[in-house]
Image: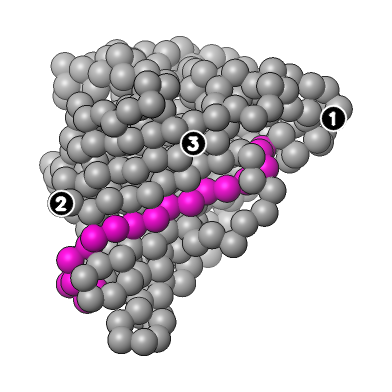
Amino acid sequence: MGEPLRIGLVGAAKISRAYLDTLPRLPGLRLTAVTDVNRTRAEAAAKSAEAAARGAESAAKSAKSAAHSAQCVAVATSADELVAREDVDAVRNLTIPAAHAEVAPAALAAGRHVYGEKPLSGTREEADAIMGAAQRTGLRVGCAPDMVLGPGTQTARKTVDDGLIGTPVAATAFMTTAGHEAWHPDPEFYYRPGGGPLLDMGPYYLSALVHLLGPVVRVTGAASRPRGQREIGSGPRAGERFAVEVDTHITGVLEHRGGALTTLLMSFDVHAARLPRIEVHSSEGSLSVPDPHTFDGPVELWRGGAWEPPAPSAGYAGSARGYGLADLAPALEAGRPHRASAELARHVLDVMLTLLDAARERTSLPVGTTCSRPEPVPFVGELSASAGHG
C-alpha cells in the first residue's frame, strides 16, 4: 500500500463523532484537516481526532503506523480553504443535504476526490452536475451510506447470490419512527425540501435493496403529511414549533430489473411498530435482513419450516462509519470501481424522487436511471492501521 489518502472533513456536527473515532484506525486513510461554520466545534473535532489517532497509534504499536497517525489535524476557516489545502486529497462532506451540491463541485474543481453524505444531492440536476464534474476531472465521487458494506447486508446478499432461497419474488422494507424532533436539537432540515423520511432514511434501505435485488426500473407511490407543525423536544430550543414542508409518510412499490417487487414504507408518523426492517421472499424460502442503518446484525434464513441464522460470510467485520472511504482508497490505488459509488447514489436518489413524483401524480412512473450492482464484499477481518484489507 502506498501513501495514505489524506482526508479533509467538512462539517463537524453530531454525525462527525463517529468518523472522528473510526478514520484514525483505518488503513490507507489519514485525517489532516477539518472545518465547520462553528469554529469552536471544528477545533473540538480536531482535538478529538488527534486523541483517537494517538489511541490508534498506541494500539498498533507499529513505527509505520505511528508515523501516519501522529499528525496534527488542521482547522480550516472555511470549506474553500480546506479544499485548497495541499495536504487534502479527498473531502469527506458531512454538511446538511442543502449544501451537498455546493461543497462537492468546489472540492472537485480544486482537484480533490469527494465522499459525500447521503443523499448525493437534493435534485437530479445537482446530482448530474456533481457526476459531470467528476467525469471531467477524472476524480472519484463516493457517497454514504457505507453500512451496506458490513457483514449484515453482505451476508444477506451472499445468501441470495448463492441461490439458497431460490429466485427472489418480493421484498418488504419498513422504516418507521415518530420523527427526529424528539432527540435532535435543530431538526428543521429534516422537514424541509431535501428532507423527509424517504430522503433521510431511504438511502440506507434502497442501497441495501440494490445490493440484494439490483436496480429499480419502475415505482408506484403514495404520500401524506398528517401534521403541519412539529415541536422540538430537546436541547436549548425545546418547545419551539416549526413548519413541516414535506410529506412525512411515504409508501410505494418498487419493481426491480430482475422482476422482484419491493413494498416500501418510510414514515415519521408511526409511534410504535413491530415491522421487520427488510425481508426478501423467494421461490424456495425467505430471508430476514438486519437493519440497514447498522453494519451488522442477525441474518435469518427460512427454508423448510424454521428460521436459521447463517454464519457471517461476507462484508467488512467490525465496520463502522468511514469504511466507505477505506474501501475507496485501495480501489483508487488499484484503478477499480469503489463500492459506495456516485453511480449507486445517483440511482438511489432518482428512485426516491421518482417515487415522490409518482405519489404526487397518484400513478406509476419509470425510473430514468440505472446502475451496476456493486461488487460484493468478501469476508474481510476487522481493518486496523497496522493491517491491510485482509
Q: Which residue is mark 2?
A: 258
Residue located at (24% from left, 44% from top): 255
Foreground of the two, 109 or 262: 262
Percent across and percent down for residue 169 are 24, 60
Of tags 1 and 2, which is closer to the observer?
2
**For residue 88, what is the image quadrant?**
top left
Mark carried by residue 238: 1
Residue 232 higher or lower than 274, as above or below: above
Q: Are marks 1 and 2 in contact (CB under 8 Å)?
A: no
Mark carried by residue 44: none
Residue located at (42% from left, 22% from top): 360
Residue 104 higher or lower than 271, as above or below: above
Residue 193 shows in the view: yes
Tell me which segment is drawn in magenta.
163-180
Percent across and percent down for residue 388 are 30, 61
Judged left or right of residue 295, residue 216 is left
Q: Are marks 1 and 3 in contact (CB under 8 Å)?
A: no
Residue 9 higher or lower than 280, as above or below: above
Label 3 is placed on what type of residue?
A: Ile
Query: Looking at the rendering, in which quadrant would you find the C terminus?
Result: bottom left
Label 1 is placed on what type of residue?
A: Ala
Of marks 2 and 3, which one's residue comes earlier in the chain? Answer: 3
Q: CA distance from mark 1 to mark 3?
A: 27 Å
Q: Is residue 145 magenta?
A: no
